[in-house]
Image (cartoon, rainbow, N blue to C red):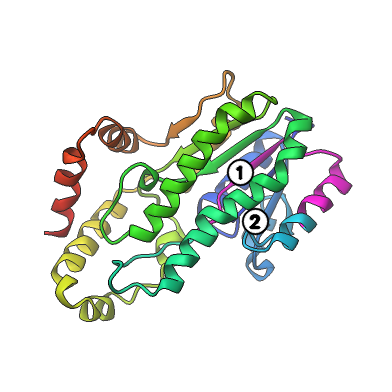
Amino acid sequence: MADKVVLITGTSSGIGLAVAAAAVKAGYKTVATLRNLDKAGPVRETGADVRSLDVTDSASIEDCLAGVVADYGRLDAVVNNAGVSVVGTVEHLPMADIRRAMEVNFFGVVAVTKAAMPLLRASKGRVVTVTSVGGAVGQPFNEAYCAAKFAVEGFMQSLEPVAATVGVGVSVIEPGAVTTEFVNNARIDVPAAIEAAGAYAPALEAYINRTRGAYSTAQTADQVAEVVLQALAAYPIVFRWQTSDFARSFVADSLSDLDGSIVAGLTSKWVR
């Protein structure tokens, strides 16, 4: 991998940080990007080339990619990882929060992929995007987040055969619960959220209790990073990757659920 250049978004912590470390270890020339360089300490320790990139800012994307080309002369892969968590139901979520979920989790992915495609065509490279089991299974109190992840999966599944005609591989990574800062970054004041939930308070409390339990047995970011590195190197290219047995079972239930009853029966238990 010594000549391969990979750019990763959202590397300040969690999965992105783990992927950057794994890519460096595997021998990639690793460009680790994040919006706020004040949080770059941990990723600098991996030995990656750390650069600023805000996936919601087209000028930032173009500047970053131009710098990569100037310094390396090529780009072989993009790992779309940057994302935000939004927890709440539509009646109470501000539209600004819903739009931000789409802007970062969907439009940011689209913008980075669009800007990188000419470079990836030249290198016959890869687009690997970290989505979620929430891109295949709608989950209570995650309407905005799952909507964005469903959109990403639809976008990438549609792009995959087209990109393949010009030699670019496309894959998505679907983790389940992962022990990262992503959950903490949702910044939920649980007592206040439940108090403000009104008629939804019992359902929200049940959901939060269930989710705490799920994250107590979650897989690590390093385990997810291993799958990302497999996807980067796989031949033949595989489109959809789950990162655990739980994720495989969960996604399989949804993909085979023609009338929606399987998922509804499962997730309705989370809010009761």
Q: As shown in the figure, which amino acid type bears the numbered disc 1?
A: Val
Label 1: which secondary element: strand
Q: As shown in the figure, which amino acid type bears the numbered disc 2?
A: Val
Judging depth in this view, the residue of 188 and 27 nearest the camera is 188
- Compared with 269, 242 (above or below) is above
Judging depth in this view, the residue of 114 and 135 nearest the camera is 114
Q: Is any part of residue 205 visible from this angle? A: yes
Which quadrant is home to the N terminus? top right
User: Percent x, y for residue 152?
Assistant: 49, 46
User: Percent x, y for residue 53?
Assistant: 69, 60
Q: Residue furthest top?
A: 236
Range covered by the magenta-colored residues: 64-83
Neighbourhood count class around disc 2 (C-alpha, 10 Å): few under 14, some 14–19, many 20 upward: many
User: Percent x, y for residue 45?
Assistant: 67, 55
Neighbourhood count class around disc 1 (C-alpha, 10 Å): few under 14, some 14–19, many 20 upward: many
Q: Is any part of residue 227 visible from this angle? A: no
Which quadrant is home to the C terminus? bottom left
Mark seen at residue 43: 2
Judging depth in this view, the residue of 36 and 103 nearest the camera is 103
Q: Residue at x 24, y 80 (%)?
A: 196
Residue 30 placement, left or right of 220: right
Q: Residue at x 56, y 31 (%)?
A: 160
- Compared with 170, 7 (above or below) is below
**Residue at image mark 1:** 79
Q: Residue at x 83, y 53 (%)?
A: 67
Label 2: which secondary element: helix
